[in-house]
Image: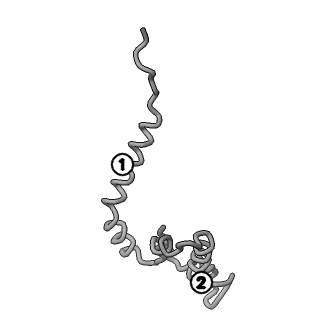
């Protein structure tokens, strides 16, 4: 999961703070939810999350994972296509 926030809304706590900007520290809330939902191994899920305001970093991360993501997508689409194919009981006599 990538949480991109160019304006920093997710990096601020409380309804208002210095400068009159509002926000919520979403990073902490989401990490706490993941830790609760996946008590057995939250680290496996947490390491797949990226919280940033750096668009170049996001492009870099996505570029690194492009091949793996495309392979998984192709496998998923192939499996979905096979599940939609009509099943035949063989030739009728």
Structural crowding at the residue carrying mark 1, measured as other residues with C-alpha within 10 Å and reported as few (<14), some (14–19) or many (≥20): few
Q: Which residue is mark 2?
A: 12
Left or right of residue 11, residue 88 in this image: left
Left or right of residue 36, residue 72 in this image: left
Name which residue lies at 62% across and 83% down.
21
Decide which of 23, 85 is in the foreground and name it: 85
Residue most toward the bottom?
18
- Image coords of residue 6 (percent x, y): 48, 76
SS at badge 2: loop
Q: How many marks?
A: 2
Name which residue lies at 65% across and 88% down.
17
Name which residue lies at 61% across and 77% down.
32
Which picture quadrant has residue 66? bottom left
- Image coords of residue 58 (percent x, y): 39, 71
Structural crowding at the residue carrying mark 2, measured as other residues with C-alpha within 10 Å and reported as few (<14), some (14–19) or many (≥20): some
Identify the image quadrant of the C terminus.
top left
The relative height of residue 15 versus residue 84 in the rendered view (above or below) is: below
- Image coords of residue 44 (percent x, y): 47, 71
SS at badge 1: helix
Q: Nearer the viewer, mark 2 or mark 1?
A: 1
Name which residue lies at 40% across and 73% down.
55
Q: Which residue is mark 1?
A: 74
As drawn, the label of residue 9 is none
- Image coords of residue 35 (percent x, y): 59, 75
């Amino acid at each position: 999961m990538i949480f991109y926030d160019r304006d920093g809304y997710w990096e601020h706590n409380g309804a208002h703070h210095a400068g009159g900007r509002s926000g919520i520290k979403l990073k902490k809330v989401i990490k706490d939810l993941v830790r609760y939902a996946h008590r057995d191994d939250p680290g496996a899920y947490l390491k797949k999350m990226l919280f940033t305001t750096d668009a170049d970093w996001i492009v870099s991360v996505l570029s690194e994972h492009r091949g793996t993501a495309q392979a998984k997508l192709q496998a998923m689409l192939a499996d979905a296509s096979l599940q939609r194919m009509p099943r035949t009981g063989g030739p009728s006599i």
